[in-house]
Image (tube, helix red, strand yellow):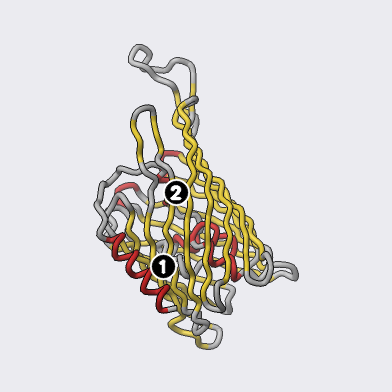
Amino acid sequence: MRKYICALIIIFCFAFGQYERPGSSAAQFLDIGVNPRAESMAGAFISMTSGAGACYYNPAALTMLAGPAFEISHTNWFADISHDYAAVALPFGRNRGIGLSFTSMITDEMIVRTPLQPDGTGETFFSGNYRFGVSMGQKLTDNVSLGVNLNYVELILFRHYKQEVYAGDVSVLYDAKIRNFKFGFKIANFGSDVKYIHESYPMPTSFVFGVSGNLIEKGANTIALSTNAYKPNDGSPKGVLGLEYGLNSMYFVRGGYHIDDPVKSFALGAGAKINTPFLPISVNYSITDYGPLGLNQRLGLEIGK
C-alpha cells in the first residue's frame, strides 16, 4: 500500500511542476462539474463521490455501489448555454462496478452573419459538445479500488466543422473504513489532440488529489469535510474545500470555496433524500459564484446508491 501512495505523491508533485500555457487546451466543457451535491462543495468530491456520479468524478468509487444507480442533472450555463449530464451504473460481481454516462453542452440557435450581411443571412447554426463514457471500477484490496473511464468526445463548432477524439481517465480510491475517511487520485482527460483545420490543441488533462472524512458523527448529525487539489495542464494549481452537514441522512446543507481561482469563489447548496421501498431518491441543488460572470445554478436527481 505504501508503494501505491508514494507513487501517487511522486506523480502529483511532477504534475504540479509542469509548464503552464493558460487557455491552450480544447474541450474545456469536460472540466465543468456535473453533480449539484459536488458543486455545492466547490467540486471537492473525488473521494466523496457515490452512485452514478462516480462515472464522472472517480470511477473507482463504482465498486461501492449497493445496487443500480441513475443520475441526471441540468445546468443553466452562461449565454443561454445548456449543460446536461446523465449516467447509469450498477454492480458487476462482488468487487466491480460499471457505468455509462453522457454529457452535453449546447448553445441556442444563432444567426449566421457575414461582413456583407451583418443582420443575418437567413440561416442559423448551433454549437455542441458531447461526451459518451464507459466506466469501470475494480477492487484491488478491501481498501483500494482502481477506476477507468473511456470517453468518446465530439465537438461541433459550425456544421461540418466537427472533431471526434478519444480520452480517458484513471483513478484510485482508498477507503480507510473509519469515519468515512477516504482519499482519491485521478488523471483526467488524457488523450489525442483536437485538430481544427491547421491548429492542434491538447485535451484538458488534469491531476486531482482529494481527501475527505466525517469530522462529527453525533446522533442524527454528521459534518463531513472534503478537500481537493488539482493541476490542469493549461493553468496554475488550485484547491477547493467543501463541507456537508447532514441530518438523519435525509436533509443536507452544503458549502464550498475555490482557493486561488481567478473566477470562482464560494458555492452553496442543499439536498434531500427519500428512502423508498425500492431505491433511495435524492434531489440536490447548488449555486456557484463566478465573479463577474454572475451566479450559476444546478439541479439534479439521483436514484440509487
Is 221 placed left or right of 93 in the picture? left
Q: Nearer the viewer, residue 213 or 256?
A: 213
The residue that appears at 44% across and 73% down in the rendered structure is: 183
The residue that appears at 40% across and 57% down in the rendered structure is: 288
Q: Amino acid at mark 1?
A: Gly
Q: Is residue 107 visible?
A: no
The residue that appears at 58% across and 76% down in the rendered structure is: 249
Q: Amino acid at mark 2?
A: Leu
Residue furthest right in the image = 277
Residue marked by disc 2: 30
Give x and y (percent) for residue 273. Answer: 61, 69
Question: How crowded is the residue under tag 1: few (<14 C-alpha within 10 Å), some, or many (20+)?
Answer: many
Report the mark closest to the observer, 2 or 1: 2
Give the mark, 2 or 1, whose residue is nearer the N terminus: 2
Q: Is residue 201 above or below residue 71?
A: above
**Callout 2: SS:** helix
User: Which quadrant does the N terminus fall into?
Assistant: bottom left
Q: CA separation, marks 2 and 1?
A: 23 Å
Give x and y (percent) for residue 220. Answer: 55, 84
Q: Is residue 279 above or below residue 79?
A: below
Question: How crowded is the residue under tag 2: few (<14 C-alpha within 10 Å), some, or many (20+)?
Answer: many
Give x and y (percent) for residue 8. Answer: 38, 68
Q: Nearer the viewer, residue 143 or 228?
A: 143
User: Which quadrant does the C terminus fall into?
Assistant: bottom right
Kindly check if marks 2 and 1 are in contact, taking CB atoms under 8 A apart as contact: no
Q: Is residue 18 visible?
A: yes
Residue marked by disc 1: 255
Give x and y (percent) for residue 22. Answer: 27, 47
